[in-house]
Amino acid sequence: LPDLDAPVLEMAFIYSVDDSGKLVRETVDLEEMTEETLLQCLIERGVLEEGTEVNTFGIDGGEKAGPGVSADAVGDGERIGTLDVSQFPQMDAAREQQILNAIANTFIDNFELDKLKILIEGENFTSANQTQGDEDYLDSTDDYTEKK
């Protein structure tokens, strides 16, 4: 018999970077999928440092069709997520890009976004390796492997 008290879990895709520098996708079950739970999953997998927090997260653009969404609410245009985090680790350019890809893919896949903007403490992403402007966004990449 099914356990009627069992929690209802949501499936999420979490991306990380393996020891060889390759992007890896893992499927996890979460009690609640929020920007905070996704960020915690990224921290647990070493993508971001312990103590990193979500300052804000928002989505602009068209609403996706689905249960509970009226046809009138479905918008057109790109769905753009903006993730503002408290910190970002300093690292070499190649690793940094893989970390950015892991964050972007995690949020784009799970929130059905077209692209993602990352801010650090409310400012455009800037590091020793790159500086993003107001119109710079991250796209998802399909260059990853599935975790076994």
Image (tube, rainbow, N blue to C red):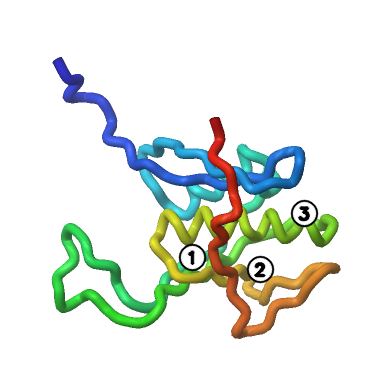
Per the image, the residue denoted by label 3 is 95
Left-right relation of 78 to 143: left
77 to 3, vertically: above or below: below
Assign a secondary structure to mark 2: loop
| 2 vs 1, front mark | 1
Is the C-beta separation of discs 1 and 3 under 8 Å? no
The residue drawn where x is 59% and y is 75% is: 137
131 to 118, vertically: above or below: below
> CA–CA distance between discs 2 and 3?
21 Å
Badge 1 amino acid: Phe
Q: Quadrant of residue 94?
A: bottom right
> CA–CA distance between discs 1 and 3?
24 Å
* Image quadrant where one finds the N terminus: top left
Q: Quadrant of residue 113?
A: bottom left
Q: Position of residue 4 (x, y in %)?
A: 17, 24
77 to 59, vertically: above or below: below
Instruction: Answer whether residue 51 is visible to the viewer in this image.
Output: no
Nearer to the camera, 38 or 77: 77
Q: Residues within 10 Å of mark 3 (few under 14, many from 20)?
A: some
Q: Which mark is residue 57?
A: 1
Is the C-beta separation of discs 2 and 3 under 8 Å? no
The residue drawn where x is 40% and y is 73% is: 79
| 2 vs 3, front mark | 3
Q: Residues within 10 Å of mark 2 (few under 14, many from 20)?
A: some
Instruction: Answer whether residue 94 is visible to the viewer in this image.
Output: yes
Q: Position of residue 5 (x, y in %)?
A: 21, 24
Badge 2 amino acid: Glu
Dot 1 or dot 3: first in sequence order is 1
Dot 2 or dot 1: first in sequence order is 1
The residue drawn where x is 45% and y is 37% is: 28
Per the image, the residue denoted by label 2 is 121
